[in-house]
């Protein structure tokens, strides 16, 4: 029986389990990446593991999220991260160099390798044919310490592409079409593997847009084959020697198939407040647009900026619309400057921002009250832009540029003739903002620099056999980590300080959550389907744990958040019968007996309503042990101490 590309790479990295029957597998990780907002906690955990140097082939620490620096906190974190990289043998990408996923694709991603990143959009690397997975910081720290990475053996979905994209329709529309078909939980524990003749029509950065935003379907990762186009890209990045040809077997067997004819795609748009609310641009034409933002790890490649710049050339943005551009990397900026195309954006009135995450994570440029904001980003969750009343829509760079010109949502095909863009044969490679690792003997002398905002990680105790307390919050379906632990300019700088950041847990939904949790000695949360979708931020588990949350009981979980809850000792349980969700109410007193956890079943006693509710879970034996110990870190520390 033929193998999918996913299986071929996984088999080569398999440490435990089998792909034939397996449920849980463990794989060897070749590369890791972190970014600053998840990195500080990840490295505090790595330090606690007591390992002398990273054990991977390559580990990179990027700084791209917290670059606003409204006070000392962020630059202190940057210095900490730089000193950690020097001490433990990592590459350090300095602030100002660009967004981790764009940079990793340009400079480090390699076909056939595995990459684990403490950011949910790590699958961008799948654009060159690697297995690139997003995870919580603790799992990435463990991989740096040489631990394998455990995951549910994913199902492999073939996304069969035929045809070719028509003018003004681009990679963003492909992934929006996937989202339109399967929604934000359609690929949980699945890999989206792209095949078919249409693949050859897409460049690596376009493939990166698609694998990047595959995250929004809940997928474990997304992957393209490594072909002649991959080879050309790597050669243009002066990395031709890293190319290997990789494709699925002709008779590969897939669990499911999605067919997309690229010829038939239209410009698409995701409405507020979910990337899964996909409509055609035509359906929303005429809506006034206050803000247009071009950038983020989804759409900030040279190709994307060039198309936007050439559409804006010689024009002025609409009087009532603000346009921001945040390029993906210094390489992109440099090309745009040298080709003169940056001038087209500036002359049209664009506000050129730093090449960093910026407005994508609410770090500046928040839209006005009630604004319509069109973004080339990957997420439009409530409040994420920094303005709770704003309505964010997700679009391609073509649709974004068109809206900036017209001031309304407009089908970009009305622009006229598609401007031609020239892509360079060789990229302007300059790694002078990436500090390489230093030899171990020298590294051992490096002093770790810690600012006053970097607080030690709280220690968590083993969990008791009986959990007791109040249902503190009941939420619905598709609760994101942006609801649980919001980001933005005010909160993101507190990522290295759990007691402080915990004040904002669930603040978008219930401003009282922090105080009430502490007052009541902690308690429980009940949720619907796909609880914890979105980011990899483990703060969405650590901070609730700090507030005393004992268990989260839901209809279903998103993959990374589930792992983070286990890692920090919050018991993740699901209803055996989804209707039992209705038998709970805020304020109910719960008791859960965990002695039967190993059997896969536990009982929730709703004391207030005097009923018993059967619960289940997907925990493996190892996960049960980690959970009972109060989290995975305790066990890893014990292992490395021996
Ligand atoms: C995001 O896009 O939500 C983030 C910010 O990049 C997160 C990571 C974080 O919260 O630091 C992610 O995608 O994992
Ligand atoms: Fe940064 Fe936005 Fe990408 Fe997250 S989604 S890594 S915040 S650009």
Image (cartoon, rainbow, N blue to C red):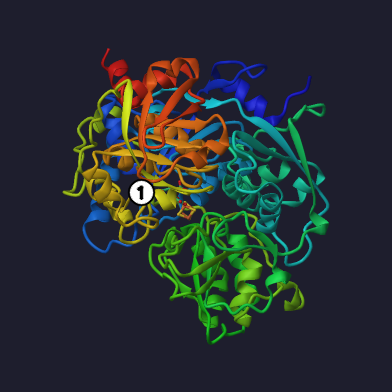
Q: Is residue 437 above or below residue 386?
A: above
Q: Is residue 516 left or right of residue 18?
A: left
Looking at the rendered image, the quarter that the N terminus falls into is top right
Residue 186, how many percent across, how many down? Answer: 65, 42
**Residue, x 42% and y 28% (percent of image)?**
604
Residue 453, how many percent across, how many down? Answer: 20, 49
Instruction: Tell which of 161 and 57 is nearer to you.
Output: 161
**Residue, x 33% and y 27% (percent of image)?**
631
Q: Is mark 1 within 8 Å of ligand 1?
A: yes
Quarter of the image for residue 159 reads: top right
Q: Is residue 88 above or below residue 494?
A: above
**Residue, x 28% and y 23% (percent of image)?**
462
Q: Which residue is mark 1?
A: 37
Residue 362, how many percent across, how many down? Answer: 41, 62
Residue 330, how many percent across, how many down? Answer: 46, 59
Quarter of the image for residue 152 reads: top right
Q: In the current view of this chain or complex, which residue is farthest to the bottom?
A: 319
Q: Is residue 15 above or below residue 218?
A: above
Residue 91 visible somewhere in the drawing? no
Q: In the current view of this chain or complex, which residue is farthest to the left?
A: 452
Q: In the current view of this chain or complex, which residue is farthest to the top?
A: 642
Q: Residues within 10 Å of mark 1 (few under 14, many from 20)?
A: many
Instruction: Tell which of 188 and 446 is nearer to you.
Output: 188
Q: Is residue 557 left or right of residue 483?
A: right
Instruction: Tell which of 151 and 570 is nearer to you.
Output: 570
Q: Is residue 307 left or right of residue 621?
A: right
Instruction: Tell which of 263 and 618 is nearer to you.
Output: 618
Q: Secondary structure at mark 1?
A: helix
């Amino acid at each position: 029986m033929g193998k999918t590309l996913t299986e071929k790479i996984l088999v080569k990295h398999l440490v435990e389990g089998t792909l034939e029957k397996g449920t849980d597998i463990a794989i060897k990780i070749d590369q890791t990446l972190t970014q600053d907002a998840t990195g500080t906690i990840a490295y505090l955990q790595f330090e606690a593991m007591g390992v002398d140097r990273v054990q991977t082939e390559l580990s990179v620490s990027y700084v791209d999220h917290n670059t606003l620096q409204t006070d000392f906190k962020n630059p202190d974190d940057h210095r900490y991260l730089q000193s950690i990289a020097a001490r433990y043998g990592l590459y350090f990408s300095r602030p100002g160099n660009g967004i981790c996923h764009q940079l990793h694709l340009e400079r480090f991603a390699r076909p056939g390798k595995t990459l684990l990143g403490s950011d949910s959009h790590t699958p961008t690397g799948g654009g060159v044919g690697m297995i690139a997975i997003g995870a919580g910081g603790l799992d990435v720290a463990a991989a740096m310490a040489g631990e394998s990475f455990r995951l549910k053996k994913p199902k492999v979905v073939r996304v069969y592409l035929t045809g070719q994209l028509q003018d003004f329709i681009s990679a963003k529309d492909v992934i929006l079409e996937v989202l339109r078909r399967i929604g934000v939980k359609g690929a949980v524990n699945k890999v989206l593997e792209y095949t078919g003749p249409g693949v050859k029509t897409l460049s690596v950065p376009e493939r990166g847009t698609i694998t990047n935003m595959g995250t929004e379907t809940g997928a474990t990762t997304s992957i393209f084959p490594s072909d002649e186009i991959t080879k050309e890209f790597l050669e243009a990045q002066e990395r031709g020697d890293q190319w290997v040809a990789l494709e699925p077997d002709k008779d590969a067997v897939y669990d499911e198939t999605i067919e997309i004819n690229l010829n038939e795609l239209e410009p698409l748009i995701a409405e507020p407040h979910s990337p899964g609310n996909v409509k055609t641009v035509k359906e929303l034409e005429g809506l006034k647009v206050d803000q247009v933002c071009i950038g983020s790890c989804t759409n900030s490649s040279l190709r994307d900026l060039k198309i936007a710049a050439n559409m804006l050339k010689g024009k002025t943005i609409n009087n009532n619309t603000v346009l921001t551009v945040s390029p993906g990397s210094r390489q992109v900026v440099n090309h745009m400057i040298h080709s003169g195309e940056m001038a087209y954006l500036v002359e049209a009135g664009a506000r050129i921002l730093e090449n960093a995450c910026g407005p994508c994570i609410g770090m500046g440029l928040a839209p006005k009250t009630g604004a319509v904001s069109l973004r080339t980003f990957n997420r439009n969750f409530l409040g994420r832009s920094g303005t709770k009343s704003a309505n964010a829509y997700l679009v391609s760079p073509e649709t974004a540029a068109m809206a900036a010109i017209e001031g309304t949502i407009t089908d970009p095909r009305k622009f006229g003739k598609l401007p031609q863009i020239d892509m360079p044969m060789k990229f302007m490679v300059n790694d002078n903002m990436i500090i390489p690792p230093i030899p171990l003997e020298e590294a051992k002398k490096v002093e770790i620099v810690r600012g006053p905002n970097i607080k030690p990680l709280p220690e968590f105790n083993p969990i008791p056999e009986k959990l007791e307390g109040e249902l503190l919050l009941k939420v619905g379906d598709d609760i994101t980590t942006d609801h649980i632990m919001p980001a933005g300019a005010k909160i993101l700088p507190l990522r290295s300080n759990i007691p402080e950041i915990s004040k904002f847990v669930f603040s978008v939904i219930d401003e009282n959550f922090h105080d009430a949790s502490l007052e009541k000695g902690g308690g429980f949360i009940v949720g619907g389907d796909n609880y914890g979708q979105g980011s990899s931020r483990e703060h969405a588990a650590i901070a609730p744990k700090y507030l005393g949350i004992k268990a989260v009981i839901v209809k279903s979980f998103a993959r990374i958040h589930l792992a983070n809850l286990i890692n920090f000792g919050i018991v993740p349980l699901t209803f055996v019968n989804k209707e039992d969700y209705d038998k709970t109410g805020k304020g109910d007193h719960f008791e859960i007996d965990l002695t039967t956890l190993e059997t896969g079943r536990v009982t929730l006693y709703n004391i207030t309503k005097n009923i018993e509710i059967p619960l289940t879970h997907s925990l493996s034996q190892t996960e049960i042990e980690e959970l009972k110990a109060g989290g995975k870190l305790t066990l890893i520390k014990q292992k490395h101490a021996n």
